[in-house]
């Protein structure tokens, strides 16, 4: 009985001593075969060519649709169809605003209505006529081009442009656009950083002009 128990324990110890090298060798051999198969598979697979058929994605921002804002009390319908809001009597620093109307998938929205109105350089709206009011339609690429002036601020508000955007078969977007580095921005209760235009300055015929850009994203 004792000898049989001793043989059993001895057999287990021998098995345990011999097992690790056996399994280690088996594991190393299996890994070697796997790595060899992987190298053969990679060698047999032709390299992937970079795709040259994809069109670049338009820059439409990552913040979702353009935020809406109140039209305020000074909107009037039936503004003139025009890209330039300037007349011979318009005083102020000239401003050109460009951009696109896009879907949330960054697709251009052609033939979108863009209606703009704002104050004159002294901060007053023309509520009797169509001074500094006008609408236009985007081209086949959803682009618009607006010529006007930098609006003046009036009590309680920073400088801004009022805009209505109506893409075909989509809801109307009513919003406002703001100017960067305006001291009154942070004190304006309606100011929204997502509605800031990007701006640069240029000199033309010794007159200072302002160039601004904003893309409207319609949900």
Image: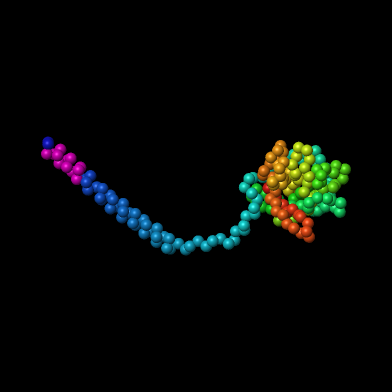
Q: Quadrant of the N terminus?
A: top left
Q: Which residue is drawn at the image coordinates 69% and 46% (left, top)?
A: 181
Q: Which residue is drawn at the image coordinates 34% and 57% (left, top)?
A: 33
Q: Position of residue 154 (x, y in %)?
A: 79, 40
Magenta residue span: 3-14
* Image color mode: rainbow
- Is residue 81 visible in the rendered image? The answer is no
- Is residue 194 visible in the rendered image? The answer is yes
Q: Quadrant of residue 192?
A: top right
Q: Position of residue 106 (x, y in %)?
A: 65, 51
Q: Quadrant of the C terminus?
A: top right
Q: Is residue 53 magenta?
A: no
Q: Nearer the viewer, residue 77 or 91?
A: 91
Q: Secondary structure of the magenta portion, mostly? A: helix
Horizontal relation, residue 131 to residue 59: left or right = right
Q: Quadrant of residue 53?
A: bottom right
Q: Position of residue 203 (x, y in %)?
A: 74, 58
Q: Which residue is drawn at the image coordinates 78% and 45% (left, top)?
A: 152
Q: Position of residue 92 (x, y in %)?
A: 81, 50
Label total for image:
0
Q: Which residue is drawn at the image coordinates 56% and 60% (left, top)?
A: 51
Which residue in the rendered view is the most extreme toward the front?
206
């Amino acid at each position: 009985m004792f000898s049989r128990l001793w043989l059993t324990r001895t057999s287990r110890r021998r098995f345990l001593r011999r097992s690790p090298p056996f399994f280690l060798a088996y594991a190393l051999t299996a890994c070697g075969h796997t790595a060899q198969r992987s190298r053969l598979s990679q060698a047999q697979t032709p390299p992937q060519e970079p795709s040259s058929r994809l069109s670049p994605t338009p820059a439409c921002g990552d913040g979702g649709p353009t935020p809406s804002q109140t039209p305020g009390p000074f909107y009037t319908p039936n503004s003139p169809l025009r890209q330039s809001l300037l007349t011979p009597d318009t005083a102020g620093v000239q401003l050109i605003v460009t951009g696109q109307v896009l879907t949330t998938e960054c697709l251009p929205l052609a033939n979108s209505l863009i209606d703009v109105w704002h104050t004159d350089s002294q901060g007053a709206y023309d509520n009797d006529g169509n001074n500094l009011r006008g609408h236009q339609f985007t081209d086949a690429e959803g682009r618009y081009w607006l010529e006007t002036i930098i609006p003046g601020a009036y009590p309680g508000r920073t400088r801004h442009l009022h805009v209505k955007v109506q893409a075909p078969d989509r809801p109307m977007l009513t919003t406002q656009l703001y100017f960067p580095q305006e001291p009154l921005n942070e004190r304006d209760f309606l100011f929204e950083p997502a509605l800031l235009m990007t701006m640069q300055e240029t000199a033309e015929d010794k007159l200072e002009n302002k160039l601004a850009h904003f893309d409207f994203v319609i949900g």
